[in-house]
Image: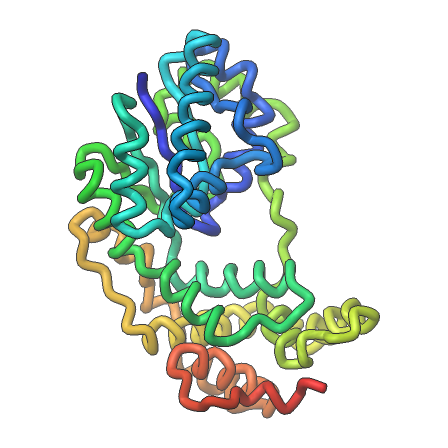
């Protein structure tokens, strides 16, 4: 029995793909491909919880759920099983090896998408500030982002365990406007079924399942003290939007700040499967550094904003600059 492990990475259309797979579960299993529902429970539409169990050493629970998934596939007479969860991509080598052992005689194929690291950093900050009302500790944020952009470590772990031939790597930047059809083709779904499932108007529901929160506004929410009083939240968002009304200038500034972060973290990629994607992952030529520098120097609050991201990469001080804004 074939097992497709879709392991992310984060911010590469995973939520859209997962919701699509779940919504079309019946049509897929009737064609021989199972997106199992027997173990989803409170996990809604994905299997990242299995990665969390592995990380906490709860191998018995992982083994139990994998057995239930296999039984569901056999009951529905499916030859292929898909498990999707972006947290799989954060597992270290030991955890990936443990997962491999638990999968037994499954014929495993790993599907992994990498995103332009600049856009990933920007999107990750936006997501964190969109979903949190409390100020994330700078050290915790710095550690997590550093791990998530270490694509070389991620790929090495999975290729060493499952072998190069079992790991397929894709550039999210090349397919982001059609991530669902691309994924379905990568797992050998019949082309006629792909056309049928993606032709209806419901596809619009998967194109923006994560509501977009202006990333530069999210940076400024941190600048405003992360809105300790929730009653000020909407006012602060409106203020941020007015400050940065020039989208082109905002994009240049954000890319520059992300560049500063990645440079401070000394991000490097050496795995041979990443080489064809290097231009997608680190497109330095797309950043006008002089223009971004000018933007940073033009207004005092932009300077403060720049110091925030630069401090994230360098941690130059024990007491972050934004601490003075906290009540």
Determine the residue positioned at 28% across, 73% down. 266
Residue plotted at (32% across, 68% down):
284
User: Within the image, what quadrant is residue 327 found in?
Assistant: bottom right
Number of marks in the rendered image = 0
Who is closer to the viewer here, 33 or 91? 91
Vertical order, 286 against 189 (above or below): below
Q: Is residue 201 left or right of residue 65?
A: right
Is residue 254 found left or right of 234 in the rendered image?
Answer: left
Who's the residue at 68% across and 78% down the image? 243
Q: Position of residue 116 (x, y in %)?
A: 38, 57
Q: Kindly identify the residue that appears in the image at 36 percent across and 61 percent down.
A: 147
Residue 106 picture location, percent across and down: 29, 23
Q: Height in image: 3 above or below 296? A: above
The image quadrant of residue 298 is bottom right
| Depicted 188 relative to depicted 154: above or below | above
Foreground residue among 236 and 38: 38
Looking at the image, which is closer to me, 60 or 24? 60
Q: Position of residue 314 (x, y in %)?
A: 38, 82
User: How has the structure been colored for display?
Assistant: rainbow
* Residue 172 appearing in the image: no
């Amino acid at each position: 029995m074939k097992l497709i492990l879709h392991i992310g990475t984060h911010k590469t259309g995973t939520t859209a793909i997962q919701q699509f797979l779940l919504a079309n579960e019946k049509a897929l299993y009737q064609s021989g491909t199972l997106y199992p529902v027997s173990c989803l429970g409170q996990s809604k539409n994905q299997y990242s919880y299995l990665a969390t169990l592995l990380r906490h050493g709860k191998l018995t629970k992982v083994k139990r759920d994998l057995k239930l998934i296999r039984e569901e596939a056999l009951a529905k007479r499916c030859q292929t099983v898909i498990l999707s969860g972006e947290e799989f991509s954060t597992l270290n080598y030991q955890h990936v090896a443990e997962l491999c052992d638990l999968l037994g005689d499954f014929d495993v194929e790993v599907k992994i998408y990498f995103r332009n690291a600049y856009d990933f950093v920007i999107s990750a900050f936006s997501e964190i500030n969109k979903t949190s009302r409390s100020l994330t500790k700078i050290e915790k944020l710095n550690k997590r982002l550093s791990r998530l952009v270490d694509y070389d470590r991620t790929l090495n772990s999975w290729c060493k365990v499952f072998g190069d031939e079992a790991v397929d790597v894709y550039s999210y930047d090349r397919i982001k406007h059609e991530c669902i059809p691309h994924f379905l083709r990568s797992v050998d779904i019949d082309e006629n079924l792909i056309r049928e499932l993606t032709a209806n108007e419901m596809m619009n529901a998967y194109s923006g399942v994560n509501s977009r929160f202006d990333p530069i506004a999210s940076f400024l929410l941190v600048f405003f003290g992360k809105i300790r009083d929730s009653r000020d939240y909407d006012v602060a968002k409106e203020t941020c939007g007015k400050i940065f009304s020039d989208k082109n200038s905002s994009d240049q500034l954000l890319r520059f700040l992300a560049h500063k972060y990645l440079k401070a973290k000394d991000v490097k990629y050496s795995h041979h499967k990443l080489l064809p994607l290097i231009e997608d992952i680190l497109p330095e030529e797309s950043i006008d550094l002089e223009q971004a520098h000018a933007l940073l120097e033009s207004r005092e609050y932009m300077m403060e904003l720049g110091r925030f991201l630069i401090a994230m990469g360098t941690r130059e001080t024990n007491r972050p600059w934004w601490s003075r804004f906290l009540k």
